[in-house]
Each structure stands twice: as structure tokens, then as C-alpha cells.
Amino acid sequence: MMRSWKFWVALGGVLGVVAMFSYGLMIDPKLVKSPLLDQPAPTFTVTRLNGTETLSLADLRGKSVVLNFWASWCVACREEARVLQEAYLDLDKGKGQARVIGIAIQDTPEAAQAFATRYGKTYFLALDNKIGEISLNFGLYGVPETFFIDLQGVIRFKKVGAVTRDEIYNYINQMTAMKESR
């Protein structure tokens, strides 16, 4: 028996939706380009994990920033913890070339502080608020994710997943070259 045209239109619509969802599930979020690239970084103010000081991203204009989102429960964050600490000692505390900042998401102050102590993190660490406002503004897919912000406060690079030493220095060097070519 011949089906009506409405049946075939409905079937085509359902198959189209299934195809779109199937395709979407195959896309690796690490390969999705952030719409924030080459845009001013969303501003925020956070309090250091130990409560001793506050930091505003706007106050860091004129300095490159390595902004890392992490969590104490994140396995990949353990892999990059020492890499970020070494970058802090060299680029932030040492050469003064870039600030290194870590923002824990979906975490408790106690768990985040225990993680920081265990992995020897001494750079500026803070918590996102309970609704995750900062991570939402940066369009996070998950943790870890690292944003590289230039001297003018513009996001130039984003790394999804654990960042490596070579990636940190490569992105910082590229931002320095961008500054010099202007």
C-alpha cells in the first residue's frame, strides 16, 4: 500500500534529525574552534583560594595571561599540574613574561586546596562561583581547558585537555611575536 506524502515528509524529518545528532556526537570538542578566539576575554574578579587577595582580569592588561580551568576531581588536571607550576615559576615569578592563573570549577574550597597542596601549585588559584559564571562566560566544554590572553586582553589561543610545556611556550612566543609585529 502506498503511504501518503505526509508519512514520507515526517520520515525524512526524523532521519534528518537522527543524522544531525549522530554527526554531532562524532565531533571531538578539542577540535571545535572557540568563538571567543580573537575576542576580548570576559572580565572577572576572583578571590585567591586561601582568601588572601583578589584578582581582576582587567587589572592584568599589559601582561600575557595563561588562564587554566581545572578541578580537583579531574584526572587530566593531575597531568598538567606540574607543567603549569613550572610555567608559573619561569614565566610569572621568574621572567615576568606572563601571569599564570588557575580557576577551579565545580569544586569545594577544601578539595581544591588539598589538590593544590598535593601538586605543589603556588600560582594564583581561585574558585569559580557556585553557578560557574566564569566558566560559562568562557564557554568551557570541560576541564582542563587553558586560554592564552594577550597584552590587550584578547584571547588568542585555547587548549582543550591537558596543556604541555611546549604548548605553553609556543603560544606565549606566538603572542609575543604578534605584539612585535604590530
Image: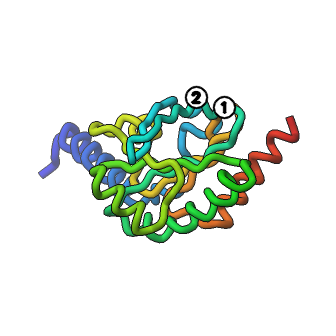
Q: Residue at x 52, y 32 (%)?
A: 56
Residue 150 visible within the image: yes
Judged from the image, the secondary structure of the residue bearing numbered disc 2 is: helix
Q: Are marks 2 and 1 in contact (CB under 8 Å)?
A: yes
Q: Residue at x 82, y 47 (%)?
A: 177
Residue 130 placement (x, y as % from top left):
27, 39
For this orientation, the residue located farthest to the front is 52
Q: Amino acid at mark 1?
A: Arg
Q: Residue at x 86, y 41 (%)?
A: 180
Q: Nearer the viewer, residue 7 or 18?
A: 18
Q: Is residue 174 left or right of residue 77?
A: right
Residue 59's quadrant in the figure?
top right
Residue 155 placement (x, y as % from top left):
62, 39
Q: Nearer the viewer, residue 11 or 102?
A: 102
Q: Nearer the viewer, residue 151 or 59?
A: 59
Residue under pointer 1: 61
Residue under pointer 2: 58
Judged from the image, the secondary structure of the residue bearing numbered disc 1 is: loop
Compared to 68, does 45 lie above or below? above
Mark 2 neighbour class, 10 Å CA radius: few under 14, some 14 to 19, many 20 or more: some
Q: Residue at x 51, y 35 (%)?
A: 55
Compared to 89, does 178 lie above or below? above
Distance (Cα) linking label 2 and label 1: 6 Å
Compared to 143, does 11 lie above or below? above
Mark 1 neighbour class, 10 Å CA radius: few under 14, some 14 to 19, many 20 or more: some
Residue 64's quadrant in the figure?
top right
The C terminus: image quadrant: top right
Q: Amino acid at mark 2?
A: Ala
Residue 124 placement (x, y as % from top left):
51, 48
Q: Nearer the viewer, residue 12 or 25?
A: 25
